[in-house]
Amino acid sequence: MDDHDGYFDERVAATYDESSEGPFEPGAVEAAVDVLAEFAGHGRALELGIGTGRIALPLSRRGVPVHGIDMSRAMVARLRAKPGGDAIGVTIGDFATTKVEGTFSVAYLVFNTIMNLTTQAAQVACFRNVAAHLEPGGVFVIEVMLPELRKLPAGQNAVPFHVSPTRWAFDIYDDIAAQTMSSNYIDVVDGRGDYRSIPFRYVWPAELDLMAQLAGLRPRERWDGWTRDPLTSESGQHVSVWEKPAD
């Protein structure tokens, strides 16, 4: 790990935007931006873990002023190199505690980024930090996976999510009680293998609701995804929205 950039160093940043599948697919990006632009209205948006600007840039092109927080200078450098990237304000730091000026209509964490905070205390601090930045009536939006514990056969702790001749990727559920896991990647390039592992702390919807309550936020919406389909017991992810009371 590069201590300067955390787990999202130049090696990760260099290839982060290469995918066009899943959350990187243009339609998926547009659906997320539709929701966030609606919540932003005529106000400002705060992205926690802004990265290379996958969401921030198209949201900014909708006329929404966006400010980001990110620990990785390598990821932010990729954002800056894109058209319009230099117009988006970014504060380098830990989004659980970093403060920025002003208030926002919407703050958001997408693509499992809440799990980059690997302790419950840090996740609680993140909610409190967001609440302090929201204007009355503003909302906090999180997109995150639902833990795939049902896919684990007895005695096993790994769930593969990509298998090809040149890449293997799998999640390891390390400690069920502590809710710790990691995503692991093995890539083969020119006959040489490369391995990296990124730790996470998975979190349940009800636990997120309690974190929101501790921060003075109240539940507003919860869907299966950005298209606002209902959440079911078979859903693999959810998009949840909490509101800062106007009073």
Image (cartoon, grey):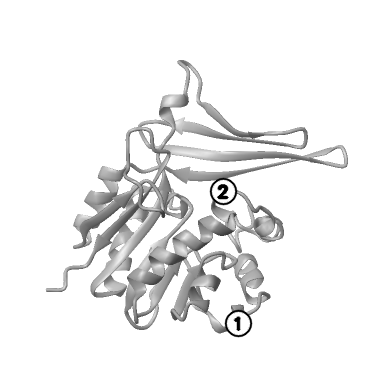
Locate residue 246, reporting x and y percent. 16, 73
Please give the count of numbered marks on the rendered protein. 2
Q: What residue is shown with label 1?
A: 86
Q: Quick check: 106 above or below 188?
A: below
Residue sitting at x 39%, y 48%: 119
Between 245 and 127, which is closer to the camera in this rendering? 245
Locate residue 104, reporting x and y percent. 33, 76
Sort mark 1 into few (<14), some (14-19) or many (20+) by Cα contacts within 10 Å: few
Q: What residue is shown with label 2?
A: 22
Local SS, label 1: helix
Q: Please state if 247 lies on the left or on the right of 19 as rendered.
A: left
Q: Please state if 215 lies on the left or on the right of 80 as rendered.
A: left
Rendered image quadrant of residue 103: bottom left
Q: Quick check: 192 above or below 151?
A: below
Rendered image quadrant of residue 17: bottom right
In the picture as drawn, the residue positioned furthest to the right comes out as 190
Locate residue 200, reporting x and y percent. 48, 45
Q: Please state if 21 lies on the left or on the right of 45 as rendered.
A: right
> Between disc 2 and disc 1, whose residue precedes?
2
Residue sitting at x 26%, y 55%: 221
